[in-house]
Image (spheres, rainbow, N blue to C red):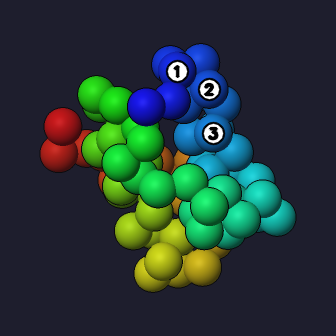
Amino acid sequence: MLLGSLSENLLVLLCYDKERAPIIRGVVDPSLFGGPYRHVAAVIYDFLDKFKRPPGDHLPDLLSDK
């Protein structure tokens, strides 16, 4: 499992970094995230897979059900 601060840093890159998000998506399995970070990572991964770009400022919309 990834440490909290590492998880947070990776999630920020996944949300906003168009160049590195697909790389992280391909290398870091969502099961490595713990607790609520796992759900956030899964939502971001689904968005990346569907739209081929990071969610950016749309993340709150994606998590509005929580």
Q: List x then y, in percent, for residue 36.
A: 30, 30
Residue at image mark 3: 10
Residue that protrudes farthest toward the right in the picture: 19
Going 62% across and 26% down the picture, which residue do you hit?
Answer: 6
Structural crowding at the residue carrying mark 2, measured as other residues with C-alpha within 10 Å and reported as few (<14), some (14–19) or many (≥20): few
Contact between marks 2 and 3 (CB within 8 A): the answer is yes
Residue that protrudes farthest toward the front in the picture: 1
Structural crowding at the residue carrying mark 1, measured as other residues with C-alpha within 10 Å and reported as few (<14), some (14–19) or many (≥20): few
Residue in front for this viewpoint, 34 or 60 = 34
Contact between marks 3 and 1 (CB within 8 A): the answer is no
Contact between marks 2 and 1 (CB within 8 A): the answer is yes
Check disc 3 and report its element: helix, strand or loop: helix
From what the image shows, is residue 21 above or below residue 16?
A: below
**Spatial separation of the CA atoms under disc 2 and disc 1:** 5 Å
Residue in front for this viewpoint, 9 or 61 = 9
**Spatial separation of the CA atoms under disc 2 and disc 3:** 6 Å
Q: Quadrant of the N terminus?
A: top left
Q: List x then y, in percent, for residue 31.
A: 35, 48
Going 52% across and 21% down the picture, which residue do you hit?
Answer: 3
Going 36% across and 55% down the picture, which residue do you hit?
Answer: 42
From what the image shows, is residue 40 above or below residue 42?
A: above
The count of marks equals 3
Say which label, 3 or 1, has the lower sequence index. Answer: 1
Residue at image mark 2: 6
Identity, as a three-letter code, of the amino acid under mark 3: Leu
Q: Quadrant of the C terminus?
A: top left
Going 45% across and 63% down the picture, which residue do you hit?
Answer: 45
Residue at image mark 1: 3
From what the image shows, is residue 38 above or below residue 20?
A: above
